Image: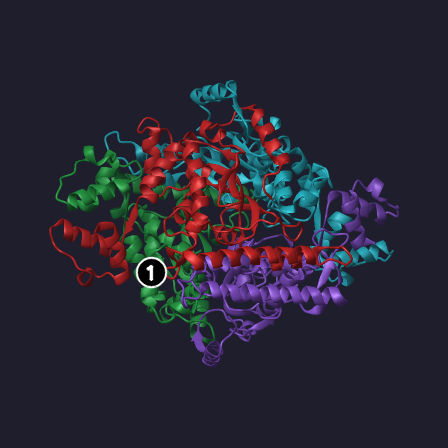
Chain colours: A cyan, B red, C purple, D green
Amino acid sequence: MPLTPDQLAEIQAARATPRPTLRAVSEGMEAHLYRAHPVLDHGFIRVIDYMGDDAAIVQAARVSYGAGTKHVQNDEGLIRYLMRHWHSTPFEMCEVKLHVKLPVFVARQWIRHRTANVNEYSARYSILDREFYIPAPEHLAAQSTVNNQGRGEVLTGEEAARVLDLLKSDANRAYDHYEAMLSQDGQQGLARELARMNLPANIYTQWYWKVDLHNLFHFLRLRADPHAQYEIRVYAEAIAACVKDWVPLAYGAFEDYRMGGVTLSSKAISALKRRLAGETVSQEDSGMSKGEWREFVEVWG
Amino acid sequence: MPLTPDQLAEIQAARATPRPTLRAVSEGMEAHLYRAHPVLDHGFIRVIDYMGDDAAIVQAARVSYGAGTKHVQNDEGLIRYLMRHWHSTPFEMCEVKLHVKLPVFVARQWIRHRTANVNEYSARYSILDREFYIPAPEHLAAQSTVNNQGRGEVLTGEEAARVLDLLKSDANRAYDHYEAMLSQDGQQGLARELARMNLPANIYTQWYWKVDLHNLFHFLRLRADPHAQYEIRVYAEAIAACVKDWVPLAYGAFEDYRMGGVTLSSKAISALKRRLAGETVSQEDSGMSKGEWREFVEVWG
Amino acid sequence: MPLTPDQLAEIQAARATPRPTLRAVSEGMEAHLYRAHPVLDHGFIRVIDYMGDDAAIVQAARVSYGAGTKHVQNDEGLIRYLMRHWHSTPFEMCEVKLHVKLPVFVARQWIRHRTANVNEYSARYSILDREFYIPAPEHLAAQSTVNNQGRGEVLTGEEAARVLDLLKSDANRAYDHYEAMLSQDGQQGLARELARMNLPANIYTQWYWKVDLHNLFHFLRLRADPHAQYEIRVYAEAIAACVKDWVPLAYGAFEDYRMGGVTLSSKAISALKRRLAGETVSQEDSGMSKGEWREFVEVWG
Amino acid sequence: MPLTPDQLAEIQAARATPRPTLRAVSEGMEAHLYRAHPVLDHGFIRVIDYMGDDAAIVQAARVSYGAGTKHVQNDEGLIRYLMRHWHSTPFEMCEVKLHVKLPVFVARQWIRHRTANVNEYSARYSILDREFYIPAPEHLAAQSTVNNQGRGEVLTGEEAARVLDLLKSDANRAYDHYEAMLSQDGQQGLARELARMNLPANIYTQWYWKVDLHNLFHFLRLRADPHAQYEIRVYAEAIAACVKDWVPLAYGAFEDYRMGGVTLSSKAISALKRRLAGETVSQEDSGMSKGEWREFVEVWG
């Protein structure tokens, strides 16, 4: 499933032959089209198609609000207003289609975002390639001692070596046996839909994934977040870099209001107001639980 | 809300300036871009943007099925296979965005299709135009005497004249009063979000509507059907004509398998098999209800 | 479409005959079942069915997190944690079905929430009742002078009287003509699907609406908000009162984190941190637009 | 992840304590509540909750169609009418929540049905149990020689023995190494979110899955179909058996119109009509492709 010479040639050919269109064109996104951005050891994301640009968001919003909005605000101001007030429908008017190659355990997390269209490579129909994700040494992390779903320090020395060895040898053995079970050399050959069950979750799969910009922002907010698992976060970051070139105004608003923003509960608002008034507030008299207080202090000191 | 000279000039300008793109281009659809196709007395549909073409459907299917499908089937065969076997995801890989102007009672039916993105003109924010749907004489139909949600013969003579007169005068009076309530001439002026409640369901609204091809086919199957209300059916037909130029192979398969197809129950299959074997089958011994039998005979005689 | 004596008798009968079930039962919600809570002048909401309770949310979360969560947190703490961290899936495990009677212009706004199931009374199939929303005098508001989609002061005196008179007389005339066009007394009678177009947007319709708790919270956040139009807000408030009795822990978390919470942009965070450090911050040096600054000052002074 | 004695005791307790409710109750479904129906070697499905019954479907349809439908048709006739005419919204008014334990490769196929709510056991947060799907000898099938995504004959003799041995030993070795990597005995212990990648696709996971009846029927139509992979089909069949007891009228209509029905293209209709008229039709003059003709002959001879 890596890009074959044939596929590379197809990409070259496609990129060599621009065609005229009357549709909205984003120069920033045209530069990305079809190009594979490497992620992890064998994965990639590449933009296959897109619909709309910053102006399309503004145009859709102005259908809703009528002529009144024409002269009131410039495009950036209007886009920031829409983002701040959670007006999601104008952002839904842009769409993007990606080709992604990713490990199965990442795909399992990704697919939980239901408001997208997906065509995945079928291991029922076809044979998977021998490609597995093996973490780079600096990402081979221990279980966090404070967070049930987080990582602690990087493994080192013998333990690291042993883990890498197990991951590699198990993956290869599983694939050898997958091939052996499929083989029709002197035997019937196990059905592909059964043989695939022997393959571990770090094998690579690939899919086409199509999503609108509003739902993509939601995906990025959760998956480009520092608390997301590293292996999906790097995909989110690679996509975010393309989105920034595609719709720079919308992406700027997203960064300011979503990625860089925080949500405060009414208890947190009270605590901050008391602090602004010069009071000292403790967890006990804030009404917050220990967990919430810890998160509050992380932001506000 | 009709196309203003400014909007017409914008359309001209946009159509006058093709730009290069590396994306999939459908020549058939480029010819439609931005152009308003009139529907009913004041409505229209026009294509604002699209993503993908017949080849994009094939490409997505081949991601799923792998290299194996490459040489097996030509594009048309594969698209027909996908349609026949209800493989919906490759059709979801195409997307279209329309600008539609339509009466409110049509919009209320249309919006029930939930898997689409919508930005509607806001009568809370802006003032609606004085434009109402008044049926052409040949579409002024009586209530069907056999079908609770259908039409019978066309009204004629005095009754037709009286109906048209009532529709026109009520619409105009309602709009006069809408304006009078809104006016800030010597009075405070009622809030727009309240004044709009005086307007009847044949006033025109407009929206941007974005949908993927699979869900659009579902919409067309229901709304371009002879049992659909005439006033929404003409919109479906205008859209269908664009889709046919956009993705001719997919549209051909849709026509054959969906628009021109029928679904048979197991009881209907039995009845047909008995007929093919030379038997005469009656409603009583078919196991079908009277309603189902009537529909069966409509198709099979 | 009001509750008829027959319907009232059905409600009585249903409420008189509890049946045993092994499912999760919410005592608070049982008390609401089938009862009509009046809203506006002729509308209501009533709970027809529900699935799950606070414990069902916790149970679903614990499927995800495994045995580890069993003893760590009590139910309230876990529910608040889920809400704070936008873990939406456990809240999706509760569902509610409502019967709602509401003016058409409210229904048009409501239906924009797409992730719900709806069965609406069909004016294509049946004849609507003569019932219109006429605002109470204290809700007859002028257009806001500062907000394009808001209300200003209440209308008074002659203007108020004139508006009420127009709304009432136009509604009644429209309905008289609707009946006259439908009538088959000495004429064919216009098709119901056409006659309905004469009816104004303040006529009442009704529907069954079924939604999961996560999406209901989203609806309530937008529609029970002070910026929502009054006529939909009162429906949201009536529903919220039932939800509070149904899932008191989840509703408490929703109130604290969503209804009473605010989202801060990275610029707003900076401004607040500078204030906490004793600095004075102005709009100009905050990086915020005038609009954002105004909203910021509304909360923080 | 099998049912522990604690869980079994909880089931017993829950089933021992019926509580009164005013909601719609399906006796047939009450008998299933919480009980685990075994599927494959370690899996199960069990009903956790449900909303509505056959009467609820009828009730929702009658909201739409008004009083007119009251006396026209009995419940079964109305439900069959709705199914025949693809009126999906009344079926959406019923909902069911299941607890399912299933192999990961089945879960991957299942999750592609997006219109459902899911809470899955998190292998990022918790440790998976040592339980793997190993096919029973009679389900150890060879690759089909005619269908890229199907099974042929059952493997026998040495080949069968070898496949079973590989599947078992690879699964156990992968799990041993999973445990060894996680262990904090004398080492840091690899993060759970990383260690899980060593586990093969036949390991069992579990989830809560909540879906409305319309979407469940769609799932059953595709997954209880003879062309579905055996390992997901048995889950669909176990669910179907519960649905039959829950909403017997709706299930009967589903069986007749969907499971037992066929869809004919306009070309297939023509071919059948010519046959009914006594003509002999061949593939060549039917206009159908070879594939479509083969499927046509399978049904009609």
A225 w.r.t. C123: above or below: above
The x and y percentages for residue A223 are 59, 42
Amino acid tagged 1: Tyr
Mark 1 falls within which chain? D
Q: Observer-nearest residue: C278 or D54?
A: D54
Determine crowd level at label 1: few under 14, some 14-19, many 20+ residues with C-alpha closer than 10 A.
some
Q: Observer-nearest residue: B10 or C260?
A: B10
The x and y percentages for residue A177 are 35, 35
C206 w.r.t. A181: above or below: below
**Residue B215 visible:** no
C31 w.r.t. A233: above or below: below
In the rendered image, which residue does mark 1 sit on? D81
On the image, which quarter does residue C141 sit in?
bottom right
**Residue A17 visible:** yes
The x and y percentages for residue C294 are 79, 49
Question: Residue sitting at 47 percent across and 81 percent down?
Answer: C16
The x and y percentages for residue B276 are 14, 49
> Tag 1, which secondary structure?
helix
Q: Quadrant of the N terminus of chain B?
A: top right
Q: Observer-nearest residue: D293 or A170?
A: D293
Q: How many marks?
A: 1
Q: Observer-nearest residue: D50 or C177?
A: C177
